[in-house]
Each structure stands twice: as C-alpha cells, then as structure tokens.
Amino acid sequence: MDRDDFASRVVAAEPTLYRISKSILKNDSDCADAVQEAITAAYDKLPSLREPGYFKTWLCRILIHECYRIYRANRNTVSLEEYAFPETAPPQIRDPGLYAAIMALREELRLVIVLHYVEGFQVTEIAQMLKIPEGTVKSRLSRARAELRSVLEQKEVPVHDA
Amino acid sequence: MTHEDWDGVFPDAPQSFHTAVEQALSECAPARTERRFLMRRKALFIAAAAVAALCVTAAAAYVFQWNEFMARRFGADPQQQELLSSSGAVGAPEQSVTENGLTVSALQTLGDQNGVYLLLSVKAPEGTALTDASGFEMLSVKLEGSDHVSWSGGFMSGAAQAASLSGADNERYFELRLYNPQQADWNGKTITLDFANLQADRGNLDMYIVTEGQWSLSWPLTYTDAMQSFTTGEPYQVNGHAVTVDSVQLSPLSLALSLSGDGLEVLVENSDLNEAGSLCTVSLTMEDGTVLEELYGPGTEGYADGHYGRTTSFDQIVDADRATALTLTFFWESGDNTITIPLN
C-alpha cells in the first residue's frame, strides 16, 4: 500500500474514526489529537499490516488505543471545552434522546454499541479489533442494549421502529 | 435491525477533526512506507494439524460422533475428532426442553481445565425468526459447588444458513463459554442453564418478548485433562522492561500463561488491558515452522498484585504436541516488543 492509497483509505474512514473517538473521549479536541496520533502511528506501522482488506479494522484498533491513552492521561482533569460547553446533543442528529443515552453508557459498553450498530462491524471484527473474545463482545452488547433500554424508558424518549 | 437504522444517530465530524486528519496525512512522508513495505515478512496463518498430544487409545473410551457444526466451528478433522472424543474432551449432554413451542437443546460440549464450550440449539415456533439481535431476557448459569461462573455467549452470529444446521430462520445455534481460570475441578459437577423469555428487536434496541417461557437444562459436565506444563521462570526484556515468564500451559484447546516481573506494571499501564483490550498477542510456532498467529480466542486476562494471568481458548484445534515456541507481542510498545518462549 503506497502513501496515496493509505491517505485515500484514511479519508474514507474519517466519519468512522470520528464516531469511534467520540465514543471514548467525547471531547472534540481530544478526538482530533487521537486521530492525528493514530494516523501517524498507523503510517509508521503500515508494514505490519499483512492484509490490506483489514485496513479499516486495523486503523480503528490503533485509534482506539490512542483514545485510551489520552483517556487515561485526562482521567483526573476536565478540559476547558467540557467545562465551558458541556456535552449536549448537536442539532443535526436525528434522535437526541438515543444519542444522549449512548453517551451516558459506560465507555466499554458505548464503544461496542458504536462499533456494532453505528459502524456496522460484525461481532467477529469487533473481537479482533479489541482483541477480546467474541463472547465478551456479545455480553457487552447485551448489557449495553439492556442499559440503553432502561435509560430510554426512564427518559420517556420514543424509540424508532425499524 | 439494520445498520441503516442508526444513520444520523451520531453527529458528523466537525471541521477541527477534518483538519486534524488532513494535517496528519500531510506529515506522512512517502518514502518511509515504500521502503519498509519491502521488509514485510510473509505471515503464515494455518490451522493446526493432528492432535498428537492426546495419547489416548481410541478404543479405550466411547467415541462420540461430533456434532457437524461443532466440528466445522473448531476446524476438527476426523482424526482430531476421534482423538479429542476418546480422550474425554467431548461431552454429549443430549438434553432438551420445550415450552410454548420453543425448544432449547444442549448438543455437545468441548473442554479442558481452562474452560468448557457448550453448543446448544434453539428452535423457535414457526414464523418466529431468530437473528443476530435475538436474545433471552434472562440466562442464568450455575455450576454445582461454585458460587459464580464466568461465562459469555449468545446466538451464533451471521446468516441463518451459517448459524443453524437447517438454515431455517426459526432455528439457530447458541453457544456458551464457561471460563475456569482457577482450573477448578468441574468434572462431574452439574451445570444448570436457566433461560427466560425470548426477545427480538424492532429496531434501535426496542426489545420485546416474542415467546414467553422458562427453559431449564441440567447435566454433569465432562472434559479432559490434557494440559502440558512448561514452567520456565526465565527473565526477558520487553522494550527495556523486565518480565518473567512464570509458567505456560498448553493443550489442543487452550493455553494458560502467567507473567510477573518489575517491568510488568509499566507494560500494563502502556496497554489498554484495564479498559477494554489486551496486554499482548500470543502466537505459537510449530515444529515445521508454521506460525499460528494472534490466538486471541475466548478466555480471561488480568493483572493484579504484580502478576499477569491469561487463559485463551482456541477457536481452532491446535496440535499442542508439535508446538515449539510461544511468542508474546506487546503490540503497543514501540520497539523490542516481542519475546519468544521455547516450549520444550
């Protein structure tokens, strides 16, 4: 994979990269830092990518690691952005109640919900991405679904039918 | 529920994020990748061959016929099936319960000291489709003599044709993994599974009960004792951090690993083990040079009081007797991040 191919794949994955980083870090400036670090690290590690077909999964995995690194570093601090502009549902989203409920989940549950439902990754892919067993992914999805339902019912936010 | 149901649930990336992506890409120098690309080593990922580790006379024990799906699931050829079956690794609970037209059946089990895989099937009433999003409102797993059993599992994912024997949309395999990191003696202990209320999803997690009822299955577990122990106690360096490999155990179905050392805490901190990830990947080198890469199957992994413990159940049967080395890659260390442990 040459640089141009790498760049075009990264650009194509940008929406996914944002949603994943947002699901872990919440803060947009931290998301930007994480994606920059992830892209640089991915480019550096590119020779270790054995199968180009797995590029997106592989890149997401690197991003997740960068997000956790920033998350740990920021654990005891609140950014000015969060302090001055606490997280609210942006105006363009379709279902503010569902978005708020997802963002209220514990991080490990929020991440699998985003990867599976929002991004459409299969359980197997998520397991590979997070390097955890498929059963653990399923369990987290199950817990996340139950918690989301509970939160949505408490808030009496209507849920969409398929 | 489809992926499209979630369109618009998350906001679009802001300009600041887009700018960050562009900036990072602009800083990627073209020459670097192309030069390193030539150095890429060809990786091997081949399923294991025979299970010679289990030196048990086939005639000495009753040989279960493997469930076709389980054989495919674990990539077990006829010879492996016979060896594992005759060694006692395979159990056939042959339990089934029906209520309100829904049948839950326990088909077969496969296990060793690190854990047991349970294969079940669920057949819902005609017209009730079982999908990736189906689930039971409650599932309780109890084991005789144990206060708590760690487990994971659910309906098989994927197309109905791959997830059920018949391909009918009201039938689907259901699999469970029981984890036994303490290697307690579960042989002969009664396992009890209690299921309640089958649920489906209208979309966006709008779960509702499609079949009410309670289904209970109970039978004594059986599995094999096939672990080979490699106690090394050897010191290693990972990116300048001292690690001691206290022990390695290996069977055709799983491995167990124990680490300690002064540098371990830093490696754990640098990893995402405490969030949602893993400390390292493991791979096995076989005597013919074949490398079984990244064996991140189901299992347990944790760090406490200076000790790291891990059990990993393989998704494919491994010829443990032919393994010559275990390689650990601490993949988020920037350099010198691999240690290779001889198995002899």
Image (tube, coloured by chain):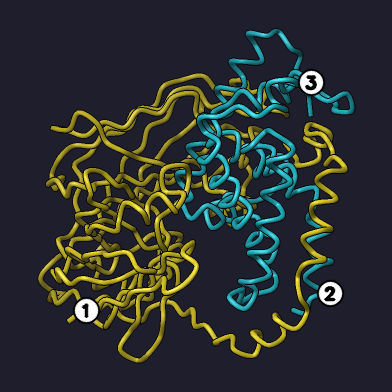
Q: CA distance from mark 3 to mark 2?
A: 37 Å
- What amino acid type should be assigned to the residue bearing mark 1? Leu
Which chain, by letter, is cyan? A
* Helix, strand or loop at mark 3: helix
* Helix, strand or loop at mark 2: helix
* Colour chosen for chain B: yellow
Instruction: Tell whether A63 sits left or right of B300.
Output: right
Which quarter of the image is occupied by the C terminus of chain B? bottom left
Q: Which residue is mark 3?
A: A96
Using a 10 Å C-alpha cutoff, classify the residue at mark 2 as few (fewer than 14 neighbours), some (14 to 19) or many (20 or more).
Answer: few
Label annotation for residue A4: 2
- What amino acid type should be assigned to the residue bearing mark 2? Asp
Are labels 3 and 2 on one chain? yes
Q: Which residue is mark 1?
A: B343
Q: Nearer the viewer, mark 3 or mark 2?
A: 2
Q: Position of residue A132 (x, y in %)?
A: 46, 51
* Residue at the (38%, 67%) spot, across then down: B282
Q: Position of residue B81 (x, y in %)?
A: 31, 70
Q: Quadrant of residue B318?
A: bottom left
Using a 10 Å C-alpha cutoff, classify the residue at mark 1 as few (fewer than 14 neighbours), some (14 to 19) or many (20 or more).
Answer: many
